[in-house]
């Protein structure tokens, strides 16, 4: 039986509440075993008619918070990350959801929904690739479809310094982002990006610092922001 034909509603009906972190967690765990490999379900094939909200926030520093409390269980965060979904609203804004076959729950994302916290070099069939890993288990390589973009971080007014461990966020800060899956992108963490500059080659051109990265036999260049 294919993933898209599995009856995910056999254990949960209209009387079951997925709007709680406990209910959603139990629902996802009940069906994770039906998928092979890393449990990324076929979200594009799911079209739930029920839409709700859950008090979940992915902070600008990558932390997940539920009802003003940080979610400290890594396994739970990784589980929820498998059902992250992005859509464009009628006003052009990006909306994020935790998506199941029976319900779509809107959440708040302050910046990028995923965070890359590791990068390394992988040698395969005579080619060297830069391979990135998110802290929730996604793996992506630098290639023409997954290129790094530097752009200014634009806070949306939802930041709470009392809840964020990253005290250096600034309205003018330029951050590195990378597409991962299903239209979702990841922020490359600061320490990971510093390591990336060590793996690449820095040069000066017309007063700008250029970072050149090699992956899969191709060069990728980034114009580094001035201090």
Image (cartoon, rainbow, N blue to C red):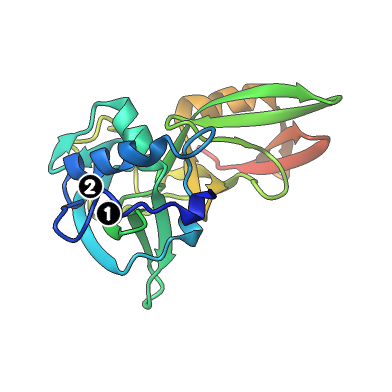
How many other residues sit within 10 Å of disc 1, few (<14), some (14-19) or many (≥20)? many
In this picture, residue 210 sits left or right of residue 168: right
Give whichever of discs 2 and 1 has the lower sequence position: 2
**Distance from the alpha carbon under mark 2 to that under mark 1:** 5 Å
**Residue shown at the point (64%, 46%) measured from the top left:** 146
- Is residue 211 depicted above or below 15 in this figure? above
How many other residues sit within 10 Å of disc 2, few (<14), some (14-19) or many (≥20)? many
Q: Identify residue for label 2.
A: 56
Q: Which residue is outermost to the bottom?
A: 90
Does residue 102 appear anywhere in the picture?
A: yes
Does residue 168 appear anywhere in the picture?
A: no
Residue 107 circle label: 1
**Residue shown at the point (16%, 47%) measured from the top left:** 20
**Residue shown at the point (69%, 22%) measured from the top left:** 121
Residues tagged 2 and 1 counted as in contact (Cβ below 8 A):
yes
Q: Indicate the secondary structure of the residue bearing disc 2.
A: strand
Measured as percent of width and height from the top left, residue 177 is found at: 52, 45
- Is residue 46 depicted above or below 57 in this figure? below
In-front residue for pair 56/29: 29
Measured as percent of width and height from the top left, residue 190 is found at: 46, 30
- Is residue 212 depicted above or below 159 in this figure? above
In this picture, residue 97 sits left or right of residue 123: left
Measured as percent of width and height from the top left, residue 51 is found at: 26, 65
């Amino acid at each position: 039986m294919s993933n898209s034909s599995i009856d995910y509603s056999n254990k949960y009906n209209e009387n079951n509440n997925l709007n709680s972190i406990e209910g959603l967690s139990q629902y996802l765990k009940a069906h994770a075993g039906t998928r092979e490999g890393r449990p990324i379900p076929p979200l594009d094939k799911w079209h739930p008619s029920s839409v709700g909200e859950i008090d979940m926030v992915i902070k600008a520093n990558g932390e997940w918070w539920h009802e003003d409390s940080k979610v400290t269980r890594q396994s739970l965060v990784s589980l929820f990350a498998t059902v992250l979904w992005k859509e464009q609203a009628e006003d052009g804004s990006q909306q994020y959801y935790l998506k199941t076959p029976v319900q779509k729950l809107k959440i708040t994302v302050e910046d990028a929904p995923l965070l890359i916290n590791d990068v390394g070099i992988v040698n395969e069939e005579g080619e060297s690739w830069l391979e990135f890993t998110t802290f929730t288990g996604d793996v992506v390589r630098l290639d023409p479809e997954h290129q790094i973009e530097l752009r200014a971080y634009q806070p949306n007014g939802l930041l709470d310094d009392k809840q964020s461990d990253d005290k250096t966020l600034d309205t003018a800060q330029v951050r590195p982002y990378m597409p991962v899956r299903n239209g979702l992108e990841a922020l490359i963490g600061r320490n990971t990006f510093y390591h990336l500059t060590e793996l690449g080659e820095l040069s000066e051109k017309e007063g700008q610092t250029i970072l050149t990265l090699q992956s899969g036999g191709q060069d990728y260049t980034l114009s580094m922001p001035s201090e």
